[in-house]
Every structure is written in structure tokens, then in C-alpha cells.
Image (tube, grey):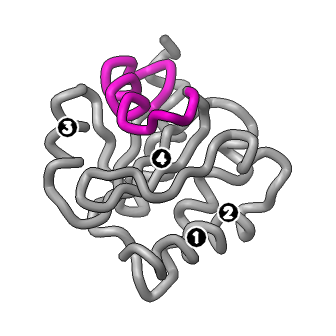
């Protein structure tokens, strides 16, 4: 587990953009049962989370269509919530950072770490915006 003072600014970056941090398996389950579209960002302390995943997810919200529910779990902090989120991302292996889009609780779009590393925030945002156009 990472110290709270280390991860707070990383959590705040998404929360300030309208994402809700989920801290328990129950919160993840309840959110995915709400229906509509749900974006889940698996946040991380790594450089690609800071450089492209979080900024890309935030920038993707400038699109006309966006998910109904914006959520995040923090790998290495919210262990129970992260495990439950990843359980719903099967068949994809655990990865952080990662960004998943669900529609009515069903995974419809996934960005794994290898889709994020080495790509710009703009490329991540464009990828997500394309998924929003299709599913939201």
C-alpha cells in the first residue's frame, strides 16, 4: 500500500475532473449495476499513469458523448475495489494503469497498460472518444 499523502494528488487529478473514487468491492458492484455507461480508470503511481492515462481520460471528457458514470480505483491503495474492477475486466490480465468502458455492466472497450505506454494523452483521449461515440 502506498502512503495516502503520496497518492492524494493522483486521486485528486481524476476526482477534480468529475471521477468518483471507489474504495470497496461493493462500490464497484453497485456502480456497474447502475446501467448506462461506466468508465473505470485503474489509477497507478507509475509514470505512464501520470503522463498519459490520467490526462487522456480527463481530456476524453471534452467529447460530445461521454460515459454516464466516471469512476476510478487505485491499484496498490484500494486493493478490494481494484480486484473487483479487474474481475469485471476478464479476459484481460490485470494491468495498471488501465481504462475500461462498461455498458450496462458489460465490458465493451479496454485500454491495457501496453495500449497506454508510449502513447500521448491526446491519443488516449481520441481512443476513448471513439469508444464513447460507439457506446455512449
First in sequence: mark 2 vs mark 3: 3
Q: Magenta region: which residues?
A: 74-93
Relative placement, left or right, of 58 versus 120 is left
Looking at the image, which residue is at 55% across and 60% down? 57
21 vs 58, left or right, is left
Q: Nearer the viewer, mark 1 or mark 4?
A: 4
**Residue 130 on image: x %, y %:** 57, 76
Residue at the spot x=55%, y=27% of the render?
A: 94
For mark 4, what is the residue?
41
The answer to whether residue 92 is above or below residue 16 is above
Classify mark 3: helix, strand or loop. Answer: helix
What is the secondary structure assignment of the residue under circle 2?
helix
Residue beneath label 2, please? 124
User: For the residue labelled by badge 1, is the local secondary structure a helix, a strand or a loop?
Assistant: helix
Q: Residue at x 54, y 51 (%)?
A: 110
Binning the other alpha carbons within 10 Å of mark 4 as few (below 14), some (14 to 19) or many (20 upward) gives many
Circle nearer the N terminus (1, 4): 4
**Dot 2 or dot 4, earlier in sequence:** 4
Q: Which residue is mark 3?
A: 29
- Give the Cα separation between the discs numbered 1 and 2: 9 Å
Label 1 packing within 10 angstroms: few (<14), some (14-19), many (20+): some
Q: Left of 38 or right of it: where is 24?
A: left
Residue picked out by circle 1:
59
Q: Position of residue 100 (x, y in %)?
A: 47, 50
Of badges 1 and 2, the one in the foreground is 2
Closest to the observer, 76 or 116: 116
- Mark 2–mark 3 Cα distance, whole angstroms, equals 26 Å
Amino acid at each position: 500500500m502506498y502512503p495516502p499523502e503520496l497518492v492524494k494528488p493522483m486521486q485528486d487529478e481524476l476526482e477534480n475532473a468529475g471521477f468518483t473514487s471507489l474504495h470497496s468491492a461493493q462500490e464497484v458492484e453497485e456502480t456497474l449495476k447502475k446501467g448506462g455507461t461506466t468508465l473505470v480508470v485503474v489509477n497507478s503511481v507509475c509514470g505512464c499513469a501520470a503522463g498519459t492515462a490520467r490526462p487522456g481520460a480527463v481530456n476524453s471528457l471534452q467529447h460530445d458523448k461521454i460515459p454516464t458514470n466516471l469512476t476510478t480505483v487505485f491499484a496498490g491503495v484500494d486493493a478490494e475495489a481494484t480486484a473487483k474492477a479487474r474481475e469485471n475486466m476478464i479476459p484481460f490480465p490485470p494491468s495498471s494503469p488501465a481504462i475500461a468502458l462498461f455498458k450496462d455492466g458489460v465490458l465493451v472497450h479496454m485500454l491495457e497498460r501496453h495500449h497506454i505506454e508510449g502513447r500521448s494523452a491526446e491519443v488516449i483521449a481520441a481512443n476513448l472518444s471513439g469508444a464513447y461515440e460507439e457506446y455512449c
